[in-house]
Amino acid sequence: MKIRILVVFTLVVLAVAFAYTASTPAAPAPQPHATTATPAEHPEIHEALASLRHAREHLEHAAHDFGGHRAEALRATDEAIRQLEICLKYDR
């Protein structure tokens, strides 16, 4: 009998705990800064973006597929460009 009460009590406590965590709102995501950084503020990052965009253009229009690595290189370059643009948005 004591075990049955203990099991029921444990289940009720777990149900309340899960209900509480499910109803608690998540913390708001940080908002990017209203303006993006200018090239003068982070010249290396802006230079890297220009280089990545140039390399992407070259890869996209190349006559061969670089041993089967062109598609993955394009995806990685796009992701690098995206991440650097996000970094500049969060600059303070």
Image (cartoon, rainbow, N blue to C red):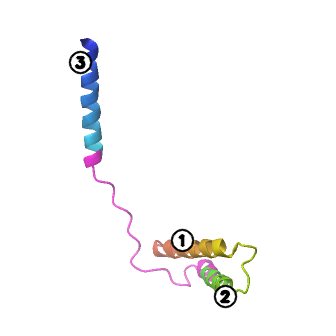
Dot 3: element:
helix
Badge number at residue 9: none
Q: Which amino acid does label 3 sit on?
A: Ile
Query: Which residue is denoted by mark 1 in the rendering?
Result: 83
Give the residue drawn at x 66%, y 88%.
61
Q: How crowded is mark 1: few (under 14 residues within 10 Å), some or many (20 or more)?
A: few
For the residues carrying marks 3 and 1, which lies nearer the camera in this image?
3
Nearest to N terminus: mark 3 or mark 2: 3
Q: How far apart, in angstroms, are the residues tagged by discs 1 and 2?
A: 23 Å
Q: How crowded is mark 3: few (under 14 residues within 10 Å), some or many (20 or more)?
A: few
Cβ atoms at labels 3 and 1 below 8 Å apart: no
Q: Which residue is drawn at 57% across and 78% down?
A: 42
Q: Name the residue under label 2.
A: 61
**Image vertical order of residue 10 relative to residue 81, above or below:** above
Whether the residues at callouts 3 and 2 have beta carbons within 8 Å, the answer is no
- Residue under the point 46% across and 71% down: 90
Q: Residue 7: x and y, percent?
A: 28, 22
Mark 3 or 1, nearer chain start: 3
Q: Which kind of residue does numbered mark 1 sit on? A: Gln
Q: Name the residue under label 3.
A: 5
Q: Taking 34 as reference, is 3 left or right?
A: left
User: Horizontal placement of 29 versus 91: left or right?
Assistant: left
35 relative position to 60: left or right: left
Q: How far, Cα to Cα, is label 3 from label 1?
A: 54 Å
- Whether the magenta-drawn stretch holds residue 13 is answered as no
**Could you say which quadrant of the image residue 34 lies in?**
bottom left
Q: Give the range drawn in magenta.
A: 22-48
Report x, y in % for residue 65. 72, 78
Q: Which of 13 and 85 is in front in this view?
A: 13
